[in-house]
Amino acid sequence: MEVDIRAAGGVSVVEPKGRIDSVTAKAFGERVCELIRGGENRVVIDLANVAYMSSAGFRSLLIVGKTIEQTAGRLALCGVIGELKRLFDIGGFSQLFVICPTRAECIAKVGPAGPQ
Amino acid sequence: MKRPPDIVYGLEEAPPPVVTMLLGVQHVGLIAINLVYPLLVFRVAGAPADAVVDLIGSGMLVLAAATLLQARRVGPFGSGFMSPAVFTATYLGPSLVAAKVGGLPLVFGMTMFAGFLEAALAPLLNRLRPIFPPEISGLVIFMIGVSAAVAGLRLMLGGSAVPVTSAEWGVATITLATMMILSVWARGMARMLCALIGVAIGYVATGIVGTFDPAQSAAVGAAAWVDVPHVGRVSWSFDFGLAVPFAIAAVAAAMKALGVITICQRANDPEWVRPDMSSIRGGVLADGAASVLSGLAGAMGTNTASANVGLAAVTGVTSRRIAYAIALILVLLAFVPKVAAALASMPRSVMVATLLFAMSSVIVQGIQIMSSRLLDARRTLTIALSIVAGIAVDIFPAIAEATPIVGSSLVLATATALGLNLLFRLGVKKKVDLTIAGEVADPDTIEAFFARYGRAWGARPEVISRAIFGVQQLAETIFENCDPKGPLAIEATFDEFNLDVRVHYQGELLELPDRRPTDQEIRESEDGVRRLAGFLVRHNADRARATAARGRVTIHFHFDH
């Protein structure tokens, strides 16, 4: 799995590509948490290119969410569509995270200009 | 039954009388568009104008009776839903052939035959599904659209058609353009009644350019404003040579009724999971009975109307009382021969434009149904070769002339598809297995396995996706947490209604909890993640069960198909 991280509108946009499963989830979660602890606590995770996410992947998202909360930061997800959306719904994660239809809306929501 | 959130008046509810009648008028407006089919058949049969007026009048009575029968559930007949009857393009191709070969008596006789056949199919629908899978239903609907559009064009461009004047081209263009513009850019009532408004504008344009047929204009003038419908000037005949095309149309009508009634069930029940076959059987039985009645009374085959059911969903009113209002309005119209005469005088330019407009949605519906399943090489060949066979009959009419059994493009396409489907069913395994022998989950192999057999079975893509996730998540969790000794054995069995997947391994039993672990449990313990995995795989399937005997664990997923 590749993870692309770039800055946009005062926000760090994290774009994982591939599978977030028991093999890759831990490294993915740690990388995003390091980013947050390094001061980048306004984060958008774009899941549009995630082909599969298992329970281990959901765990890493929960850990990222908790880390963001501890630093009073903000997190939003986009690209939660199709099969992934179904899994978010089954697991009760759709209500747990801020999910926006597009990356731009996520950036507007968690960025410095977004609602306080 | 709960009322869905977007329904204002549900099946058992009573909208105010004014709303009921206005919606009834709107539905009848849609139903009236389909009168173009019997009009075309009557015209091809060379029926005189006054006879056509009578036949349209009795046709409206038949539609009223069929709409009531469908909504009321009398004995075994009827689905119980507001699902009006309309004359259908499904019977247009065979009826046109019958009109040419044996005139209207043959059309009426064969329509009764098809109605009886459709009614007889009602109890067998479930068993027909493997022989008539969705891609073939879609193909039949696609070919119904194509063949009806071509039949319309023949009125203007066919070898025996009177040459088209530039004024007629103008009227056809204005009519079609009006329908297209209203359908794409208008809103509300104008959009819903776009076809009817287009027909009205077509009539006005024909009046302006003066291309009405003088004989038919005289018939409109002579028709009474109010009169008792003359039912009875009808005779019937039967031709074995046309039994095959009408039988295929009857099967297609049964499939269409099944689909429309399923839409009704879904629109009325927010907790709908799968079709209620009892209501569908009654609906198809009533649909067949309506065609029998239609042939008896001197009209062509009818079918439940997808456009009206769509309109009910859009307006949020699925009340059964609307069906009663529709029936009442149709009966009243049958007593106004001038309306029937005006419809019977429909200029060919307006008729062709209406057919092309109506058929566009039929053709696309067919394409959507064909592509709703995973297609492997067998199914791809079945669809493609059948379409080519059907279109060949339209391009080279000599094929049908040389072999009358071929009948029409619809018949040859359907027969080709059914034949190839039966042939290609040979050698398709219903039970398949896979062994994962390594020490990791091997997700790519699991995905390739289900994708391959999903295509061979023609399974729904969403069901295969769920099976892939379930087995991948399960394999991952077993290798991580259940200490498996030896390989994972995966077996999958499929029929048209069920996909069952069993995963066997030696090791610890994986719990499939009904309650999701808390966020904290998931974050902070391996057991939390393991239970989340069990929870996800349990709720990913329609049913899931884990059993263990002598250290051998079996996890069974069931998916409704």
Image (tube, grey):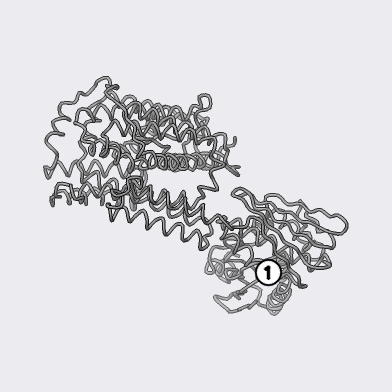
Front-most of residues B16 and B32: B32
Using the image, determine if residue A88 lies above or below residue B56: below
Which residue is situated farthest in the front direction here?
B402
Q: Is mark 1 on a helix, strand or loop?
A: helix
Viewport quadrant of the C terminus of chain A: bottom right
Viewport quadrant of the N terminus of chain A: bottom right
List the residue tagged with mark 1. B443
Where residue B331 appears, as percent x and y from the top left, is 34, 25
Q: In this view, does B318 lie to the left or right of B397?
A: right
Q: Label 1 crowding class (10 Å Cα cut-off): few <14, some 14-19, many 20+? A: many
Front-most of residues B38 and B401: B401
Q: Is residue B16 left or right of residue B184?
A: right
Which residue is situated farthest in the top direction here?
B228
Front-most of residues B24 and B367: B367
Q: In this view, does B403 lie to the left or right of B269?
A: left
Chain ID, mark 1: B
Which residue does the image show at 81% across and 58% down from the upper left? B553
At label 1, which amino acid type do we have? Pro
Using the image, determine if residue B385 lies above or below residue B52: below
Where residue A29 appears, as percent x and y from the top left, is 71, 73
Where residue B271 appears, as percent x and y from the top left, is 60, 42
Using the image, determine if residue B33 lies above or below residue B233: below
Where residue B297 appears, as percent x and y from the top left, is 33, 26
The image quadrant of residue B276 is top right
